[in-house]
Amino acid sequence: MLRHVLAFLTLVMLAAPGITHAQEAETPAIDRSATGGAQTLEDILARQRGEAIDDTFRSSATGNPEGAAGIVNQLGTLGGASDPEVWRALRYGSADVKVSAGGEVASVLMQDGGMRWLAFRDGPLRDYGGGLLLATIVLLALFYVLRGKIRIDEEMTGRTVTRFQAIERFAHWLLAGSFIVLALTGLFVLFGRIFIAPYVGLEFNAFLLTWSKWVHNNISWAFILGLVMVFFMWVWHNIPNRTDIIWIRQFGGIIGKNHPPAKKFNFGQKIIFWSVIVFGGSIAVSGVSLLFPFELPLFAKTFAIMNDLGLPGLAGMESLPTALSPQEEMQLAQLWHAIMAFVLMAIIFAHIYIGSVGMEGASGAMTTGEVDEAWAHQHHSIWLDEVKEAKAKAEAGTATPAE
């Protein structure tokens, strides 16, 4: 009992100077000579009070053999370095480590980049990513209130034309459906702790996130397949041409009453297509790298190429690191994966809006595959003329000549 009382009094006496220092404008340097440069009780109490301290001692103090207690004495240390100091040296790369194989990366026994990754993931990634999605929804809602649905000016003809074949619709919905599942499961994993767990409990959140990760990893292959199918089926229709200039000048008919001519895909749809291919492709590549980090590292080689091209120097930066551990590769790949996903989700929100409530008659193109000729003439007049011409030639070719 007496030892506990003495320990408490000692703690109070040591804490009192710290409390006084917290009220001062500047905190004086802490004397760590008695600990050989390692942290003291005063350091611990200062952190508990939320005070900012100079923690350079954590990376510079790795033990003093001269000040070590004898090994035969109680609590004696080997080589003058306690276990915490050894681990500190390993963390900050000041330990003398030699490896027989693996190069510079293998000599890093402890890399603390995970804390920087976690800080970015729980901070800017959540804040700016979530803000981007909310801002996109608000802007689309505001646009709908101000502009309203884009109506078909002409009277419906009742005659339909095939906009997309069954295989095209399959590829579209394979890509779209898998992306929606991937987006939801990814958002669950990123925001589950702050938006799900407080309301349904940690246990359900853990169950949901475990299955979300499993679904996310496996549905990704359907997304990649859909991406490849869509690219090869539609890439030739999405190459920019001169008709796009007219579409740009007239704002695609979204602003005003003009209806610019267009082929199978107008300029706005081409933007969507190439956004899906570029951002979706980047998401797919970084996702596969996350699944196989040891076999398919992504950033070390990319950084080496960027350094060779001098890109960091043009941006006023130092050369990028080209020796990255698998953990660092995964941290960078996960952040890049999420950033690209947020950008693509915002773009897809706009695509969903136009294809559903934003434009009259557009939904039939990807449901039944058929659209009214009036809709086709208003939004894709050049394509409609090409379809009619091809149909007329086919009918003329199969017609029986008169005797």
Image (cartoon, helix red, strand yellow):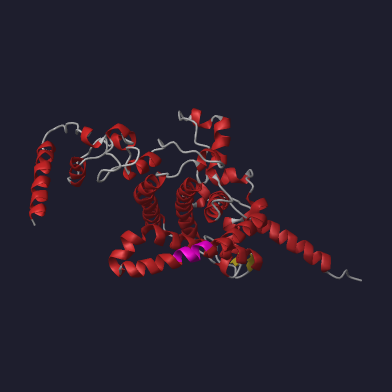
Main SS, magenta residues: helix
Question: In the image, 403: left or right of 177?
Answer: right
Which residue occupies 38% across, 44% down?
116
Q: Is 251 located above or below residue 232 in the figure? A: above
Question: In the image, 66: left or right of 290?
Answer: left
Q: Is 343 located above or below residue 26 in the figure? A: below
Q: Kindly indicate the quadrant of the structure image that contains residue 90.
A: top left
Q: Which residues are magenta?
A: 212-217
Residue closest to the far front: 72
In this view, the residue in front, 22 or 252, is 22
In this view, the residue in front, 31 or 69, is 69
In percent of width and height, residue 36 lies at 26, 35
Question: In the image, 138: left or right of 357?
Answer: left
In percent of width and height, residue 311 lies at 53, 31
Which residue occupies 32% across, 36% down?
63
In this view, the residue in front, 314 or 48, is 48
In this view, the residue in front, 34 or 348, is 34
In percent of width and height, residue 331 lies at 45, 48
In percent of width and height, residue 176 lies at 53, 62
Q: Kindly indicate the quadrant of the structure image that contains residue 191.
A: bottom left
Indicate the quadrant containing the C terminus: top left, top right, bottom left or bottom right. Answer: bottom right
Q: Is residue 246 magenta?
A: no
